[in-house]
Image (tube, rainbow, N blue to C red):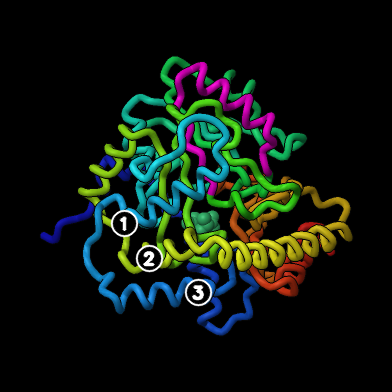
Amino acid sequence: MPLEFQPSANIARMKESATLAVAAKARALKAAGLAIIDLGAGEPDFDTPAFIREAAVAAMNAGATRYTATEGILPLRDAIAADANRRLAHGAPITAAEVVVSSGSKQSLYNACVCCFGPGDEVLIPTPAWTSYYEMVELARAVSVPVFGEPANDLKVTADQLRAAATPRTKGLMLNSPSNPTGAVYTRDELAAILELAAELGWWVLADEIYLRIAYEGGAQSVLEVATARDNLIVINGVAKAYAMTGWRIGWTIAPLAVSKAMTAFQSHTTSNPAAVSQHAALAALARTEEADAVVGEMVRAFRARRDAVVAALAAFPSVRYVHPAGAFYVYINVAGFRGAADAGAAFAAAVLEEHQVAVVPGNAFLTPDWIRASYATTEAIAVDGITRIARCLTGG
Ligand code: GLU
């Protein structure tokens, strides 16, 4: 008798990543010859800057082809610490010992969840939030507790809402600004209130800052610029979004020493070091600040122009409600009531793909089924065409 696969208790409730599933579907439809406008994937359309690619080639030819330290090469961890110290407002400078480099910020987040949370712990997730937070917390066998933001506050949550959702089992919270999926950016005061609450109640704060450099209105604040202490902070970042390096898979955590050691030990059993050549590419991105600032600035300016163009296109459809996109490269659009469907976002995503050839991510992936996410990390013309089709589909135009 062939063995029948029964998912283990570890993954019994797990669902596939909806963001990656939409990306895969859009790729497959394109490969089949359909002219799909892909606003699904949250992936910069730019090539990795040339000086970074060249640094990787040089490193590979110089022998960066072997294992490295599990936590990553020291020069990269030094460069990450130096980069973070430029934002740090209080306390002793961050050192390389507090940095663990992983195979993408997704792994960094997962390391942090597994090491800080366990069975019975509750983790507050300001919602809507990136689909994988809920799953990672559950894979760590903790309980994910969504805390819903109000549309009037761009779907951001307040410290008061978090306090109201807390129980004695609350162990931490996920923070993400600029936000995926909404593009909303927390103000300094909002962050300060949340950090103060977390410090008061002894919560871990997992601050996912992967979109930090992609913000359009005076910039986004890092928790490092706001927090008065770091002992409960785990800051997660990576090169994927700001440097257009999604495929290189390099992310990192900045965390207190004991947490960093635990995450290194955990990683030593799961993946060991991230790819050596990718670490050298990331080193160029982080250490060659002048060249990096120039190319990142150029990409952010392009994202901003697309953001402006998308907002201008939506202005022609005044009944369409969306979160003001102040950062990242997403626009989060309300589709409540679409064709009377119970899951309006899923119904809309299916309809706009089938009838208008636009791929978007349904809001149920982010626990808010009345919404859909459109990514404008594509050319301005494609973004505007896609958004216009979305608005037409929604308004029946
Ligand atoms: N984070 C991006 C997104 O939300 C990439 C896909 C993923 O890893 O979820 O689309």
Q: Which mark is residue 73?
A: 1
The Cα–Cα distance between marks 3 and 2, rounded to whole angstroms, is 12 Å
Q: Which mark is residue 187?
A: none
Residue at 57% x, 34% y: name it: 89
The secondary structure type at the circle numbered 1 is loop
**Residue 216 higher or lower than 145, as above or below:** below
The residue under label 2 is 280
Q: Residues within 10 Å of mark 2 (few under 14, many from 20)?
A: many
Amino acid type of the residue that numbered disc 3 sits on in the rendered structure: Phe
Q: Is residue 200 on the magenta stretch? A: yes
Q: Is residue 56 on the magenta stretch? A: no
Specify the segment rendered in magenta: 185-209
The secondary structure type at the circle numbered 2 is helix
The Cα–Cα distance between marks 1 and 2, rounded to whole angstroms, is 8 Å
The secondary structure type at the circle numbered 3 is helix
Mark 1 close to ligand 1, CB under 8 Å: no
